[in-house]
Amino acid sequence: MKNDWVSKLVGDVAIVLCGEAGQGIQTVEHILTQTLKLSGYHVFSTQEYMSRIRGGSNSTLIRVSSSRVAASVNRMDLLIPFSPGAVRHLQKRISSQTVLLGEKTLYEKECQDCRSIHVPLSLMAQEIGGLIYLNTVAIGMLAGLFRVEKELLRQYLQNYFAGKDEQTIQKNLQAMGRGYEGSEELLRSGKMQIDLMKHEEVKHEILMDGVEALAMGVIAGGCNFLSFYPMSPSTALAVHLAERSKEFDIIVEQAEDEISAMNMAIGAWYAGAKGLASTSGGGFALMVEGLSLAGMIESPMVIHIGQRPGPATGLPTRTEQGELLFTLFAGHGEFPRIILAPGTIEDCFYLGQKAFELADRYQVPVFILTDQYLLESHYNLPTLELFRTPLQKHLVETGKGYKRYLLTETGLSPRGIPGYGQGLVVLDSDEHDEEGHITEDLDLRIKMVNKRLKKIDLLMEDILSPDLIGSENYETLIIGWGSTYHAIKEALNRLERKEVSFLHFKQVYPIHPKVHHSLQKAKKRIIIENNATAQFGQLIRMKTGLEMDHQILQYNGLPFTADDLEKRLKSILD
C-alpha cells in the first residue's frame, strides 16, 4: 500500500460511509451532520440504499464545507467502509485522491494500491464492550478529525441516548472518547490535514431534509387530513405527520389501499377539511379514477407523489423523475390541474404550503412531485418564512337555493360544504346541472365542460415563473426542473461560463407563457432530466413547438452529481 502521501483536504470534504443495511449508517449520519452543523460547518448529506432490510451495501455521502453546499458529488475524499462489500460497491467512485479510513481487512484485497489508513474501529469497540459501539467509535473519530468540540459532542450524545439506561449512555460516551483519541493520533501523524472554515451563524441554522420541510409546509398550508397506503419514498411524510398529528390536530389515516386513500381525501374536502393523499407512482396508478372524480365534482385536492424508478416495482428505494407525463395525463376526461415540483428543501416547504391555497382557491387537483433524492437529502438553511402564503378562507356559507355548480363568467362557482349554511350541497360523479343533479342535457353538458376548462385561464394568474440563474444575456440555456436544481447550479458555477444560464422550473404545469421567449432567444438549449425520455422536454415541445438541442439524461436510479454534470456539460459546450 502507498505510504508516501499526505492528504490535504481544503474547503470542501466529501465523506462516504458504506455498510450493510442494519449496521446503523443512518445513525452515524444523523449525529455527525448535526454536530458538524452545531460546530459551524455547512453540511449536506444524502443516501443511496438497496431494497432490503438486512445485508447489501448502502452508502451515505456527507459533504462538510466552508461554504454553503446542497448538491451530491461523485467525488470521495474519505471512504469509511463498515462491511466487506463496501469497496466493491463503490469501486467506480474511488480515485487516486480517495483515502480509505478504517479496518484494512475490509479493503486490502480489493484496493491494494489505494490510499489508506488502518484504524482498528472494531478493536476499539471491543475494548469498550462490544461491536455494538462501533458506530459511536466512528462518530468520535470523524468528529475529532473535523475538530468538533469534545464537550459539544458529549452533550449531543447524552441527549441522543437519553432514553437508554445509564450504563449504555456511559459506554457510548466512552466509545466516542476512544474514537476521538484515534482522530487526534491521526492528525498528529500528519497523514491527514483538514482545513475548513467555521461560521458562527451556521450553528443557529436549521438542518432538515425534504420530508421534514414538506411536512411543515403542508401543515402551514392548513392540511388537517392525510390518507395514504405505505409506499416508499412517500411513507416518510405520513410518518412525520402522524408523529405530529396531536400537536397540529391532523387526522392521519392508513387506508386499506390507494383507491380508498384517494377517495377519503376527496371526502375530507367535501366535509370542509383540507386533505392530502400521499403516494408514489405505483400507488398513484390506483388513484387515477378518484382523480377524475375530483375533476368532475370540482373538488380541491392535493396529491403528493414521491417519484421512484418504474415501471412496476422498478427500483423502489432509488430516485427518478419518471412520473411527470403520467401525472399530467392521468384521468379520463378533460379537467384542469396544477403540477408543482420542488427543487430545493426550501421549495418543499413553500410549495407544500402553496399547494393547498391553489387547490382551495381554484377547486382543482394540485400535485406535488418530489423524489427519493430530494425527500431524503439534508442541508442547513438560514430560516423559512412561515407565512409566505397566508391562510385564506374560500368556503362560502350557503343560502337557500344554493347551486354548487353555478355557471359563472370565470368558471369558478362558490364552494359550500354540508352543514355550513342553509343550502343543500349536492355532488355527483355523473355530468350534472348547476345544483349538482344528474343531467343528460347535451347543451348543458357543453356549458359544464367549458365551465371547468375556463379555470385554466384563472390558473395562469397564479402561475409560478421559472427561476433564471445566470445572466439574461445568455447564448446557451440549460433547462431543468424539480430536484436537479442544486446539482445543475453548482455545475454551472464550476464552469464559470458567463454565456451559459440555467432556467429552473418548480411549476411544470401549466407552463409560464414567457417560457417561449426565454427558450427562443437561446442559440443552444440543453435539457437535463432524471429520466430516459426527456419528459419535460416533450411537454415544452408540445406547448411551445421548440426542440432541445441537447439532452443530458440519467435513469440508473441515482441523482445527478455536480462534478459529473460539470464534465457532461463541458463536453457539449466545448
Image: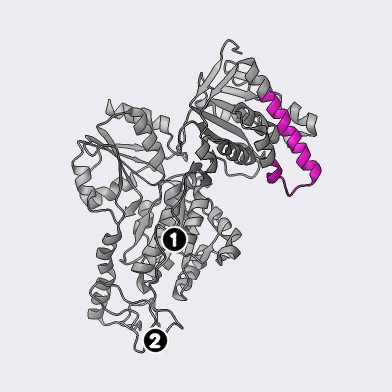
Q: What x and y, as percent, mark residue 358?
A: 36, 63
Are the residues at dot 2 and dot 1 in contact (C-beta closer than 8 Å)?
no
Question: Magenta residues?
Answer: 157-183
Mark 2 crowdedness (10 Å alpha carbons): few <14, some 14-19, many ≥20 = some
Taking the magenta stretch, the answer to whether it contains residue 296 is no
Sequence order check: which comes first, mark 2 or mark 1? 1
Q: What x and y, as percent, mark residue 6?
A: 56, 15
Determine the image quadrant of residue 531.
top left
Q: Is residue 312 visible?
A: yes
Position of 142 compared to 435: left or right? right
Name the residue nearer the viewer: 325 or 394: 394
Position of 70 compared to 28: left or right? left
Determine the image quadrant of residue 456.
bottom left
Q: Residue furthest front?
A: 200
Q: Is residue 44 visible?
A: no
Image quarter where the C terminus lies is top left
Q: What x and y, as percent, mark residue 377?
A: 50, 43
Name the residue nearer the viewer: 304 or 39: 39
Tag 2: residue type?
Gly
Determine the image quadrant of residue 569.
top left
Cα distance between the residues tagged 2 and 1: 29 Å
Which type of secondary structure does the marked residue at label 1 adopt? strand
Q: Nearer the viewer, mark 2 or mark 1?
A: 2
Image quarter where the N terminus lies is top right
User: Which residue in the structure is indicated by mark 1?
Assistant: 303
Q: What x and y, as percent, mark residue 425?
A: 40, 82
**In the figure, 549 relative to 77: above or below?**
below
Mark identifier at residue 423: 2
